[in-house]
């Protein structure tokens, strides 16, 4: 009775294959000298016989590395499926084309071009290989609608998928927003500290052990006590609980006209620009407060500061598992920190080798609340020049010039 043909390579071939997997990951390349060092084959001729056996059974892929014959390993389950009698020649050919692209993947049309197969044959082979778990489709960030294929043992390169911040070729805005907020909150907690002070009614705020924080009015710090602040004619502007008096100060501006009322019928543009003159309005100081409602002050920036470094932030994110089901690396964090720096949300402190948060600006929303609370601004934001669409064309003596500008005359109250 005739013996059955073997369903796998020879024992010597499998011993060489297992030796390769024990010394390097799958898809690693081995030349003749490296394989001879494993002492499986006694000489190059025997090694060639063993390698040919592994190539025929799809365990090895014959390559040419710089003109030298080399062999690349395949996953054992892939080798068994490719060497099975049910796998067609077209399927092996398509698999080999996809495998050659490694972790870059290849587009369906490119597969047709390289294999010279009919599109219907290519699609049939791709469907069979995908259902067998030999290949997978990958979405590119630059062309999410195109189907790219890659062998299942490879992970797509970041240049293909866009890395952690892309999902099936689309920018994952929700993840970026959530992660940015997490980073800013963490950096902020290491950049600012809430003060502990005593309220005007004498009740202790916080733990009561801290010093009394300085009160600031109109941006002036360390105003220790004042009973009233007048505008020069004896009329009080606002009250402060204290027994000491504060002499009138000419540095405080005096209001010449009432604030402009903003009605519902006023246009958005008029609401945004119908502000009183900056010289006629008291500037109200709005402190940066923490979660407990107390004012925050920054830690000093020096070489002893303990601002969180990129490594600290990365450890905080990974330890608390803010990113799940995605490979988040330090390079992804550095890219996000660069964006936050450009947006002015964090600041890299070189002397401390860490990041500090920047005090957030007041929201600018052109509505009634904005007009009531943030309508003062600065001289530059009030001047029509700051939003003039023809500012670059304006020059003295030109067709568009400050002397004939109706908006500038109106702003300066020139008839």
Image (spheres, helix red, strand yellow):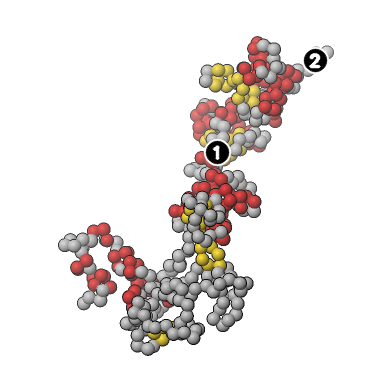
* Vertical side of 141 occupied by 118: above or below: above
> Which label sits on residue 143?
none
Q: Which residue is mark 1?
A: 157
* Vertical side of 213 occupied by 399: above or below: above
Q: Position of residue 6 (x, y in %)?
A: 75, 19
Secondary element at image label 1: loop
Residue at screen point 70% across, 30% down: 77
Residue occupying the far right of the picture: 1
**Side (left or right) of 371 relative to 314:** left
Q: Position of residue 112 (x, y in %)?
A: 52, 30
How many discs mark residues in the rendered view? Answer: 2
Q: Which residue is mark 2?
A: 3
95, 259: nearer the viewer: 259
* Sequence-first tag of 2 and 1: 2
Res 328 visible: yes
Alpha-carbon distance for marks 2 and 1? 47 Å
* Comparing labels 2 and 1, the label whose residue is closer to the camera: 1
Residue at screen point 49% across, 43% down: 143
144, 86: nearer the viewer: 144
Classed neighbour count for the residue bearing mark 2: other residues with Cα under 10 Å, few (<14), some (14–19), many (≥20): few
Residue at screen point 61% across, 22% down: 30
Res 172 visible: no
Q: Quadrant of the C terminus?
A: bottom left
Residue at screen point 41% across, 70% down: 366
Classed neighbour count for the residue bearing mark 1: other residues with Cα under 10 Å, few (<14), some (14–19), many (≥20): some
Q: Quadrant of residue 200?
A: bottom right
Q: Quadrant of residue 208?
A: bottom right
């Amino acid at each position: 009775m005739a013996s059955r043909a073997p369903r796998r390579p020879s024992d010597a071939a499998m011993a060489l294959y297992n030796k390769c997997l024990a010394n390097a990951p799958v898809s690693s390349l081995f030349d003749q000298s490296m394989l001879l060092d494993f002492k499986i084959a006694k000489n190059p001729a025997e090694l060639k016989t063993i390698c040919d056996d592994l190539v025929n059974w799809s365990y090895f892929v014959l390559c040419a590395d710089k003109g030298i014959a080399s062999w690349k390993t395949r996953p054992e389950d892939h080798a068994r499926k490719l060497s099975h009698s049910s796998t067609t020649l077209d399927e092996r050919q398509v698999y080999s084309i996809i495998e050659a692209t490694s972790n870059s993947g290849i587009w369906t049309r490119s597969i047709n071009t390289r294999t010279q197969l009919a599109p219907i044959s290519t699609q049939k082979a791709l469907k069979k290989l995908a259902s067998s778990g030999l290949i997978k489709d990958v979405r590119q960030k630059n062309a999410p609608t195109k189907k790219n294929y890659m062998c299942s043992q490879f992970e797509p390169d970041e240049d293909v998928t866009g890395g952690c911040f892309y999902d099936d070729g689309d920018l994952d805005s929700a993840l970026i927003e959530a992660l940015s907020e997490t980073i800013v909150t963490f950096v902020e907690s290491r950049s600012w500290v809430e003060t502990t002070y005593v309220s005007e009614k004498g009740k202790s705020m916080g733990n009561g052990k801290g010093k009394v924080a300085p009160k600031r009015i109109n941006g002036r710090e360390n105003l220790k006590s004042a009973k009233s602040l007048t505008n020069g004619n004896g009329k009080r502007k606002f009250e402060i609980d204290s027994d000491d008096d504060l002499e009138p100060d000419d540095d405080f501006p005096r209001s010449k006209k009432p604030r402009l009322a903003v009605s519902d019928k006023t246009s958005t543009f008029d609401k945004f620009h119908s502000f009183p003159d900056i010289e006629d309005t008291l500037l109200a100081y709005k402190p940066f407060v923490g979660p407990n409602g107390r004012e925050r002050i920054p830690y000093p920036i020096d070489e002893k500061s303990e601002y969180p470094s990129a490594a600290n932030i990365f450890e905080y994110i990974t330890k608390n598992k803010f990113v799940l089901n995605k490979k988040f690396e330090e390079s992804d964090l550095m890219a996000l920190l660069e964006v936050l720096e450009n947006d002015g949300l964090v600041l890299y402190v070189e002397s401390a080798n860490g990041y500090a948060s920047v005090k957030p600006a007041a929201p600018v929303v052109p509505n009634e609340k904005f007009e009531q609370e943030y309508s003062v601004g600065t001289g530059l934001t009030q001047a029509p020049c700051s939003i003039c669409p023809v500012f670059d064309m304006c020059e003295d003596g030109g067709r568009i010039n400050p002397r004939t500008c109706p908006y500038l005359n109106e702003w300066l109250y020139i008839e």
